[in-house]
Image: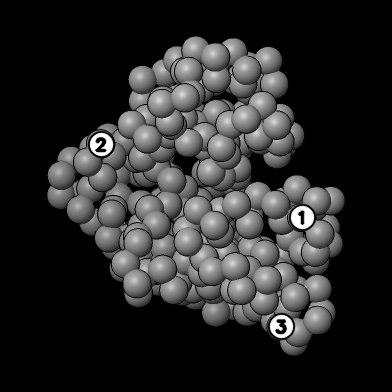
Amino acid sequence: MSGHSKWHNIQARKGKSDAQRGKIFTKIGREIAVVVKQGGSDPQSNPKLRDVIAKAKQNNMPNDSIERSIKKASGELSGVNYESCTYEGYGTGGSAVIVECLTDNKNRTAGDVRHAFDKFGGSMGATGCVSYLFQRKGIVEIEKTDSVDSDELMMSALECGAVDVVEYDDSFEIVTEANAHSGISEQLTKAGYNVLSAETTLVPDSYVNLDNEKIVKFNRMIETLEDLDDVQEVYHNVNLPEEE
């Protein structure tokens, strides 16, 4: 069992203040809109919707807000159509950055993302310029309680098809292949484990180290990107200090 998952540090940091929480709810609402249009409004038959609902609850999104987002997407309420787009580029020190967005105006989003890159010494590149440096993986987060035996969980997860289990102070992360997280999440739930979230993430094949001055500038760029309404996730290959 791994002692520390490097990509745990490079996932988008989601703040928990009231101001930030509102932005998180907006982003999750857009995710719900997209997955409902793709697979329907019933979470029992739409595993992607089930995953996003779990993510919403993990972020303390109210149930009525979740239901309203689902109704908007299914046409019961008027809503906006969002489409996904991905931008790639470089941060300070040649670092690689991927920005996943949901937007109703690609021109606006591209301009905002490009401005964030440029402002902090980065540059937005062409599609494919850095994506080859990452692999998409699934992550299933399991609540860590006194009743959960880490060895038993690891055996159960591997039997379900997981590729790794990472232990943290208050949770376990089950690492899966890209499209396997929903099925493994279901199996572990049936086995009695409390699944906190199940989603995909981009994992870099290798990491770059930056000096303190470049890390400060890099973090400001990432925070600016994450603060954009149209941005859902930001991934990168910078080896940040653990306190980040």
Q: Considering only vertical position in the picture, is 206 above or below 117?
A: above
Between the C-alphas of marks 2 and 3, the distance is 40 Å
- Horizontal relation, residue 197 to residue 114: left or right: right
Kindly identify which residue carries mark 2.
242
- Give the image location of residue 42, x and y in percent: 81, 59
Kindly identify which residue carries mark 1.
43
Between the C-alphas of marks 1 and 3, the distance is 19 Å
- Give the image location of residue 230, x and y in percent: 53, 71
Kindly identify which residue carries mark 3.
79
Check disc 2: other Cα within 10 Å, few if <14, some if 14-19, many if 20+.
few
Of residue 176 and residue 114, the one placed in the foreground of this image is: 176
At horizontal 66% and vertical 26% (from top left) the residue drawn is 191
Type of the residue with mark 1: Pro
Instruction: Kindly tell me whether residue 65 is visible in this rendering.
Output: yes
Check disc 3: other Cα within 10 Å, few if <14, some if 14-19, many if 20+.
few
Where is the C terminus found, in terms of image quarters? top left
Secondary element at tag 2: loop
Secondary element at tag 1: loop
At horizontal 67% and vertical 76% (from top left) the residue drawn is 68
Type of the residue with mark 2: Glu
Return the residue found at the far bottom: 78
At horizontal 42% and vertical 18% (from top left) the residue drawn is 2
Check disc 1: other Cα within 10 Å, few if <14, some if 14-19, many if 20+.
some
- Give the image location of residue 130, x and y in percent: 52, 44
Q: Considering only vertical position in the picture, is 152 above or below 191?
A: above
Q: Earlier in the sequence, mark 2 or mark 1?
A: 1
- Give the image location of residue 183, x and y in percent: 74, 34
- Horizontal relation, residue 115 to residue 52: left or right: left
